[in-house]
Amino acid sequence: MPLAGQGMLLTSMDIDPSDEADFNRWYDQEHLEERVAIEGFNEARRYVAEQGSPKYLCLYSTGTIDVLNSEPYRARLAHPTEWSVATMAKFKNMIRSVARITISKGTGRGAVLGIIRLRPKPGQDQALRDALCIELDPSNLDGIISMHLLEGDSDLSGPTGGIPASSRGADWFVLIDGTDSHAIATLMTTRFAAIDGPLATQISVGLYRLMWDLSKADIA
């Protein structure tokens, strides 16, 4: 499975241009390493939007989804640094989803990420999962490395620890890892165009470029 672990924390936000330099400094110099150091976290990846909103996206993979409700993680949320408190208060349009990685196909991860946010129709979870299990196959697709499904947990998602998030925790996210923005954008508007229909409602799509990533091995 190309994604490390079975749990994922997805966060996405905008920030005022006047605060952007300090926001990026905080992420790069403190926040990513602080989170990856927590027991059960495997890696984190930071992205910036080429197309879509919010502008910034971060993915944190964990061994299991239970890590994102564990005592070490909750202790960190309950005791943020002063820099974290000041920075998080400036987040805008924040999305915070704690999710299970239920499908992950391919080998490796790309420098470009396509993301589709969708909301399953009532009673259609398994039918949607079955359909996506077929579609999330990167075999023989130029510029596509791997594809994944994240299923949000409504109890664990949303605002926590002073983070002013507003999101539907039960939303799902399709992730498309690749090397070519055009290939990913084309795939989202062809293979996944029918995702907005009887099984699910498509909420948004976006195309993001990798800024950098950090794994547990980097800080061990």
Image (cartoon, rainbow, N blue to C red):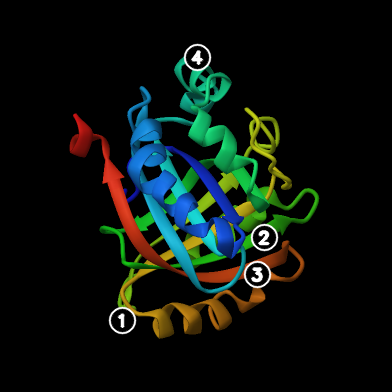
Percent of width and height locating residue 120: 72, 55
Mark 2 and mark 3: span between their CA atoms?
8 Å
Q: Amino acid at mark 3?
A: Ile
Q: Quadrant of residue 138?
A: bottom left
Where is 155 relative to 56, above or below? above
- Residue 142, numbered label: 1
Q: Residue furthest front?
A: 18
The quarter of the picture where the C terminus appears is: top left
Q: Which residue occupies 44% across, 77% down? A: 184
Q: Earlier in the sequence, mark 1 or mark 2?
A: 2
Q: Earlier in the sequence, mark 4 or mark 2?
A: 4
Image marks 1 and 4: residues in contact by CB distance under 8 Å: no
Percent of width and height locating residue 161: 62, 27
Percent of width and height locating residue 203: 71, 64
Is residue 137 among what the camera can see?
Answer: no
Q: Secondary structure at mark 2?
A: strand
Q: Secondary structure at mark 1?
A: loop
Q: Secondary structure at mark 4?
A: helix
Image marks 2 and 3: residues in contact by CB distance under 8 Å: yes
Image marks 3 and 1: residues in contact by CB distance under 8 Å: no
Q: Nearer the viewer, mark 1 or mark 4?
A: 4
Q: Which residue bears the numbered disc 2?
A: 118
Q: Which residue bears the numbered disc 4?
A: 71
Q: How many marks?
A: 4
Question: For this view, does 105 lie left or right of residue 191?
Answer: left
Q: Which residue occupies 69% across, 38% down? A: 158
